[in-house]
Amino acid sequence: MYLQKAEETSDIYGFEKIPEDVPFGAGALIIYYLNDPKKEPLFTIHKNGKIFVKDDTYTLSYVSGEEYIVLSLYDENKDLEVGRVLVNP
């Protein structure tokens, strides 16, 4: 699994990996608003391929892909694509 960040949103969203030595969500990647001091996850991408979204204003949609499954992470609040997740089936 690979995350391709949208370049035009680098000043809006932060991306952090949860440390491997924690009891819950180890190794997951979280995406949050940079201006949020609590870093509340908008998207959480787990190592096992599960992707969680905060609520229905953040969406996943299938884009395309020949060798990979490509999912677009979209923020309806800001009308922006946050990035794309490439998954090798």
Image (cartoon, rainbow, N blue to C red):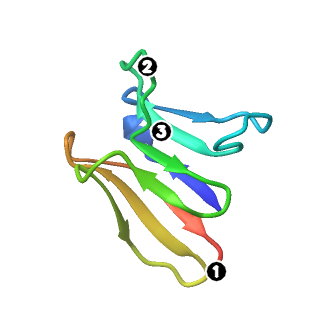
- Return the residue at label 1: 89
What residue is rendered at 66% in x and 62% in y?
48
Rendered residue at 64%/80% (across/down): 89
Secondary structure at badge 2 equals loop
Q: Secondary structure at mark 3?
A: strand
Q: Amino acid at mark 3?
A: Ile
- Type of amino acid at the residue the image marks with label 1: Pro
Q: Whole-Å distance between the Cαs marked 1 and 3?
A: 23 Å
Q: Earlier in the sequence, mark 1 or mark 2?
A: 2
| Left or right relative to 7: residue 57 | left
Q: Say if 42 sits above or below 65 in the image.
A: above
Dot 2: within a 10 Å radius of its alpha carbon, few (fewer than 14), some, or many (20 or more) residues?
Answer: few
Q: Position of residue 1 (x, y in %)?
A: 65, 62
Label 3: few (<14), some (14–19) or many (≥20) C-alpha neighbours in 10 Å: many
User: Which is nearer the N-term, disc 2 or disc 3?
Assistant: 3
Dot label at residue 38: 2
Q: In which image quadrant can residue 15 be found?
A: top right
